[in-house]
Image: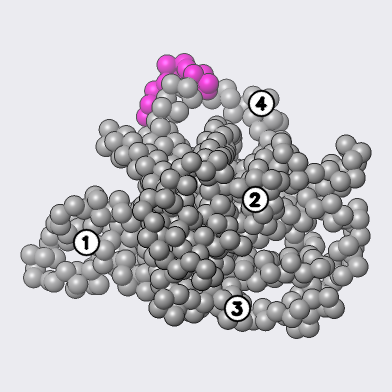
């Protein structure tokens, strides 16, 4: 291994890596620090790198809106984001886990095509299918309601559940399933008492990614949601139409919005690539 | 829906008009342009991000505290709400607030350096933001592909005296092929979904320079005009295109994986 000791690997590689870090962190640095600027510092130009940290942005966001800003119920928006993403994921798990089980271990016809159709949902550009959904929900009176949004989010959550769970269940040898069947266990019993306990990690990963998909969504909530169901990203969007864009408030909300996702990221870093590709790259 | 003349605000309810919407859609210069733009944008981005991301993956695919910290940091753009990412860039690039725009203004001497409102610049802006957001995806997936690779061929090559670049070219990259197909599939498909950045940055402009297909469908159906029939025809055609591309890519992918 001459490479490892050469000049290139001792000097150039670390420099390249640090450049990568700078590229990733410089926008995040400005977002994070802007969240802690007060309403004067946020408008100083050129932007000052040194300032007295203030929590005015957070206070404005959570309690009283500053002048020139319409108050926004950020508590409600965070509740909406949390409620919609967890409920729709719970339903998607209920529907998707049995499907994943069937696609992985049962003998059924057209397995590949069924699996394919779930993968196709991941490929659809949301805007193109939201228009018919918009009119359907309108007819059903479900536009801008939680139920309507949850129905749509379940659809978009399913590919994560089905494909990830399937990839995790595939890693359990088929003999385990057969042995249990020989012992007379029903499929539901095998799924609940043998397979699911064996793929707990997979269950968690697919649930988390389905939640993140919904938590981070803008398009669906923007098009078929309403004022009462407004999630955090959509509410952030409405701030920009204000006369004054108070970036400290925006980024304060943004930082709060990112905290759960970042915690998840650190805990689940091992599964990241597998999850992002729906189990296609292990 | 795509077969009806249908405007939401009641001037015309759903009236069957044969294939007129499709004729209008196919012959519409706006639609043709936005489809071409969407395809070109996605293809170009994938062409840039794929080699760059694999390069970064090769750089980071090693032990050491710095490398693992960079690997972990690269996941940040992937967990962040995309809408927030675009807001962050809008802040950075807006004249009068953003540090990046300040730097550019100082360099070029132009107090209103146009990141969004002039034609070649706006594409560069979109692509820079997209690279910030999605290069980590390519890298993270490529690292996973690299580390799940069998070690024996590489070790054998080293014993035979192959240097780093030879074994990269003849062993690592060919073995990475299944991963590359997955990356290309996901990057293409996700670039076709470009919507939030248009909403925040340009609203489709300047002119129609950033009217990507998703934005055109949205604007036609739920914008000011609300021509449901025409918008649905756009959507159907766009879906057919996207599904054809993704099915072809998925087919190729499964063929390669089965060997």
Q: Earlier in the sequence, mark 1 or mark 4?
A: 4
Q: Are marks 3 and 2 in contact (CB under 8 Å)?
A: no
* Display coloring: one colour
Please give the residue where the numbered disc 4 appears in the rendered image: A8
Q: Position of residue B186 (x, y in %)?
A: 46, 45
Q: Residues within 10 Å of mark 1 (few under 14, many from 20)?
A: some
Magenta segment's dominant SS is helix
In space, the residues marked 1 and 2 are separated at their CA atoms by 44 Å
B84 vs A190, nearest the viewer: B84
Q: Quadrant of residue A60?
A: bottom right
Q: Earlier in the sequence, mark 3 or mark 4?
A: 4
B98 vs B230, nearest the viewer: B230
Residue drawn at the location 42% of the way across and 66% of the way down: B14
Q: Residues within 10 Å of mark 3 (few under 14, many from 20)?
A: few
Q: Quadrant of the C terminus of chain B?
A: top left
In space, the residues marked 3 and 2 are separated at their CA atoms by 25 Å
Residue A59 visible = no
Please give the residue where the numbered disc 1 appears in the rendered image: A102
Left or right: residue A184 versus residue A91 is: left
In space, the residues marked 3 and 4 are separated at their CA atoms by 57 Å
Please give the residue where the numbered disc 2 appears in the rendered image: B204
B38 vs B24, nearest the viewer: B24
Residue drawn at the location 82% of the way across and 67% of the way down: A244
Which chain letter goes with mark 4? A
A219 vs A252, nearest the viewer: A219
Helix, strand or loop at label 1? It is: helix
Residue B161 part of the magenta segment = yes
Residue drawn at the location 62% of the way across and 68% of the way down: A234
Please give the residue where the numbered disc 3 appears in the rendered image: A227
The region drawn magenta spans B152-166
Which chain letter goes with mark 1? A
């Amino acid at each position: 291994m001459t490479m490892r000791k050469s000049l290139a690997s001792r000097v150039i590689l670390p420099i390249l890596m640090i450049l990568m870090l700078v590229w990733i962190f410089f926008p995040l640095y400005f977002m994070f620090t802007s969240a802690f600027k007060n309403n004067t510092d946020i408008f100083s130009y050129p932007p000052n790198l040194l300032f007295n940290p203030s929590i005015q942005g957070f206070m404005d966001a959570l309690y009283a809106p500053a002048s020139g800003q319409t108050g926004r119920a950020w508590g409600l928006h965070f509740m909406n984001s949390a409620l919609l993403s967890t409920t729709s994921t719970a339903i998607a798990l209920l529907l998707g886990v049995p499907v994943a089980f069937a696609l992985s271990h049962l003998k059924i016809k057209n397995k590949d095509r069924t699996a394919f159709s779930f993968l196709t949902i991941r490929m659809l550009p949301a805007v193109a299918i939201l228009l018919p959904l918009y009119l359907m929900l309108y007819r059903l009176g479900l536009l801008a309601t939680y139920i309507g949004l949850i129905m749509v989010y379940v659809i978009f959550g399913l590919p994560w559940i089905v494909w990830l769970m399937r990839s995790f269940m595939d890693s359990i040898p088929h003999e385990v399933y057969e042995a249990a069947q020989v012992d007379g266990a029903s499929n539901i019993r095998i799924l609940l008492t043998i397979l699911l306990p064996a793929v707990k990690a997979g269950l968690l990963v697919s649930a988390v990614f389905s939640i993140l998909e919904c938590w981070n969504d803008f398009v669906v909530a923007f098009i078929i949601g309403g004022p009462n169901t407004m999630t955090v990203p959509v509410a952030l969007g409405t701030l920009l139409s204000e006369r004054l864009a108070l970036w400290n408030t925006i980024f304060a909300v943004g930082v709060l919005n990112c905290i759960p996702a970042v915690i998840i990221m650190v805990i689940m870093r091992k599964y990241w690539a597998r999850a992002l590709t729906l189990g296609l790259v292990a | 829906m795509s077969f009806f003349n249908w405007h939401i605000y009641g001037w015309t309810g759903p009236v069957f008009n044969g294939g007129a919407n499709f004729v209008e859609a196919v012959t519409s210069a706006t639609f043709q342009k936005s489809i071409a733009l969407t395809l070109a944008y996605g293809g170009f981005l994938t062409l840039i991000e794929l080699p760059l991301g694999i390069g970064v993956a090769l750089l980071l695919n090693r032990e050491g505290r710095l490398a693992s910290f960079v690997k972990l940091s690269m996941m940040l753009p992937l967990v962040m709400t995309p809408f927030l990412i675009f807001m962050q860039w809008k802040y950075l690039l807006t004249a009068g607030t953003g540090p990046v725009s300040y730097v550019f203004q100082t360099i070029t001497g132009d107090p209103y350096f146009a990141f969004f409102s002039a034609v070649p610049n706006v594409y560069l802006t979109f692509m820079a933001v997209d690279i910030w957001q999605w290069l980590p995806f390519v890298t993270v997936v490529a690292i996973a592909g690299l580390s799940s690779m069998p070690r024996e061929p590489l070790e054998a090559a080293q014993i035979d005296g192959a240097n780093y670049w030879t074994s990269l070219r003849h062993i690592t990259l060919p073995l990475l092929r299944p991963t590359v197909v997955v990356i290309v599939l996901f990057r293409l498909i996700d670039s076709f979904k470009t919507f939030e950045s248009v909403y925040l940055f340009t609203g489709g402009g300047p002119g129609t320079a950033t009217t990507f297909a998703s934005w055109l469908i949205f604007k036609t159906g739920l914008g000011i005009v609300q021509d449901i029939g025409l918008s649905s025809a756009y959507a159907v055609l766009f879906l057919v295109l996207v599904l054809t591309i993704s099915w072809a890519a998925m087919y190729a992918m499964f063929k390669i994986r089965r060997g």
